[in-house]
Image: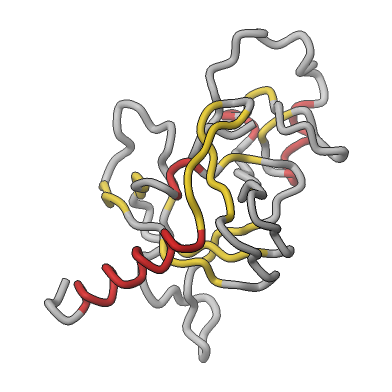
Amino acid sequence: MSHEAVPSRRADRERLLTLVQPGTTHVGTGVFARRRLKSGMVLGEIFGQVCDDHPADPSYCMELPSGKVLEPSAPLRFLNHSCDPNCELFYWFDEDDPQVVVEDRLWLQTIRDIEPGGELLIDYCWPADASIRCRCGAANCRGWIVDPDELHLLKDRDPCREETEVAPTRAGDAG
């Protein structure tokens, strides 16, 4: 990273901290809006340590386009799951070739308005083989933290019969 990038990243992090703060949820720690956040607002980059391999405890890890994983730092490491999210993760793509990711960096953006005190939520879209029981409480809850396209793979599993003592779900501590 160049020296020119350091102040920019520091300023981005400081800006992010004026927008969000961690707080307690029914599943552990979450991220909450400090002020009203409009739909389509890019909140900032998700900073953290980029690893070549999954760490021993991949609870907070997020996959990057290169196949590496990002172990995010607070506060965005505490983003919780919801089957009805109000935020999404994205990568910057080349405008001329939408198949090409410009950088191996991850960003967070709102997809709905979020009022002050509202929790920021993303859909983890985990693969079916990594799914766990969902406790998000959304009206459209799938019962599983799973990619909606893979929900059919869980048709024979009953989330109510799964282990009742489920560890908090996280890239935060999602529900």
Q: In the displayed structure, does residue 128 sit left or right of residue 57?
A: right
Q: Could you tell me which quadrant the C terminus lies in?
A: top right
In terms of image quadrants, where is residue 65? Answer: bottom left
Residue under the point 12% across and 77% down: 3
- The reply to whether residue 81 is visible in this rendering is yes
- The reply to whether residue 122 is visible in this rendering is no
Residue under the point 26% across and 47% down: 52
Q: Position of residue 38 (x, y in %)?
A: 68, 70
Residue under the point 45% across and 49% down: 76
**Does residue 98 sit above or below 60 in this rendering?**
below
In terms of image quadrants, where is residue 111? Answer: bottom right
Residue under the point 70% across and 11% down: 162
Q: In the displayed structure, does residue 132 sit left or right of residue 103?
A: right
Residue extending furthest left?
3
Q: Could you tell me which quadrant the N terminus lies in?
A: bottom left
Name the residue nearer the viewer: 22 or 76. Answer: 22
Q: Position of residue 53 (x, y in %)?
A: 29, 41
Q: Position of residue 2 (x, y in %)?
A: 14, 77
Q: Position of residue 33 (x, y in %)?
A: 58, 55
Query: Coloured how?
Result: secondary structure
